[in-house]
Structure formats: structure tokens, C-alpha cells
Image (tube, grey):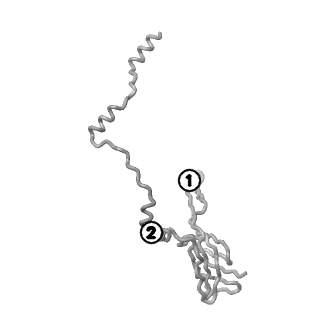
Amino acid sequence: MTFAVIKTGGKQYKVAANDLVRIEKIAGDAGEVVTFENVLMVGDTIGVPLVEGALVAGEVVEQFRDKKVIIFKKKRRQHYRRKNGHRQELTLVRITEILTGGAKPSAKKAAAPKKAEKAEAVPVADVAEEKPAKKAPAKKAETKAEAADATKTKAKAPAKKPAAKKAEKADKE
């Protein structure tokens, strides 16, 4: 099985066909084909600095964030502490093929249709018919006078007065 050494995101990775590689975030949604032109080595061929006509193709599997790394700095007896956290954004790529001699990557596999394509497939008139009718909004008081009447009609429990509590204590004694 042939392998290649590629450079992306300031790091070098040794990859082979069907490998899953976690790399620094690159542009692309899941299912898109990406190519890596910075190929440093293919099998026994070492580039100076890159291998001429070499190309590595891959498919984006997922965009995600790595686990949190805590950075804690402290200088003892100086009352100096700094706590920081960082989550690196990464891309999971499946390497599909390693190409040499200026060959182009093969066409993208038939992936699931995107949301935009699904929306185009359904006629607009059918979508409008399928949606249920919206509920009528809750009734609101139309004028300030009606709102005032509505608040007056609500029954409130009578509040006990402090003088009544003192009288009750005096009766008990």
C-alpha cells in the first residue's frame, strides 16, 4: 500500500488510501471533495521540497471542535494566576486516493442531496397546501378602558392588616 506525506495547517501527516485524518479546519461541508497539493513524499519518491505532479484527494467527513484544553499560568508567591481555555476547530477527512503524474481526482461519489436541492424538487404550490393553518393569536384588550375593566374584575384575596394580627395575639393572652 502506497503512502504519502502531506502538509496542511502547518503540520505534516503520513496518509494512505482510506485513512481518517484529523486536520486543522479547512473549508468544506461534509461530503465535499478536497485536494492537498503540498505533497512532500509519495512512497519512495522524496520531493524537493514538493513532489512534482503529486496530489492527494480526500472527502470531508465532519467539521467539529476538539476537547477543551486548559491553559493555567501561575507564578508562586506573586499573586499571579491566569486561566484560559481553548477548543481547536478540526476537520475529519477520509483520504480517497493518492495521485501522481498530474492526474486529476476522480468524480465525487453520489452523496445525499443537499437541503437546497430537496426544496427545489417540491413545487411551491404543493408546499403551501400541506402547511396547516396558523392559529389565531390570543385575544387582547382593544382599548385601555377594557384593559382596566379586566384587571378590576379579577378577584384578589384580601390582605391581612398588621393591626389585626396584634389584636389576635392580645386575645390569646
Q: Position of residue 33 (x, y in %)?
A: 57, 77
Residue 155: numbered disc: none
Q: Position of residue 99 (x, y in %)?
A: 63, 85
Q: Amino acid at mark 1?
A: Arg
Q: Amino acid at mark 2?
A: Pro
Closer to the eye: label 2 or 1: 2
Q: Residue at x 65, y 79 (%)?
A: 5
Q: Residue at x 41, y 14 (%)?
A: 167
Q: Nearer the viewer, residue 17 or 4?
A: 17
Q: Position of residue 6 (x, y in %)?
A: 63, 79
Q: Position of residue 39 (x, y in %)?
A: 62, 82
Q: Nearer the viewer, residue 93 or 113?
A: 113
Quadrant position of residue 25? bottom right
Quarter containing the N terminus: bottom right
Q: Is residue 159 above or below residue 105?
A: above
Q: Is residue 33 above or below residue 166?
A: below
Residue 81: numbered disc: 1
**Furthest residue in direction bottom, as rendered:** 101
Secondary element under disc 1, as helix, strand or loop, is strand
Quadrant position of residue 75? bottom right
Q: CA distance from mark 2 to mark 1?
A: 61 Å
Q: Earlier in the sequence, mark 2 or mark 1?
A: 1
Q: Nearer the viewer, residue 156 or 85?
A: 156
Q: Is residue 149 left or right of residue 86?
A: left
Q: Is residue 59 left or right of residue 161?
A: right
Q: Is residue 63 above or below residue 170?
A: below
Q: Residues within 10 Å of mark 2 (few under 14, many from 20)?
A: few
Residue indicated by mark 2: 123
Cβ–Cβ below 8 Å for labels 2 and 1? Answer: no
Secondary element under disc 2, as helix, strand or loop, is loop
Q: Residues within 10 Å of mark 1 (few under 14, many from 20)?
A: few
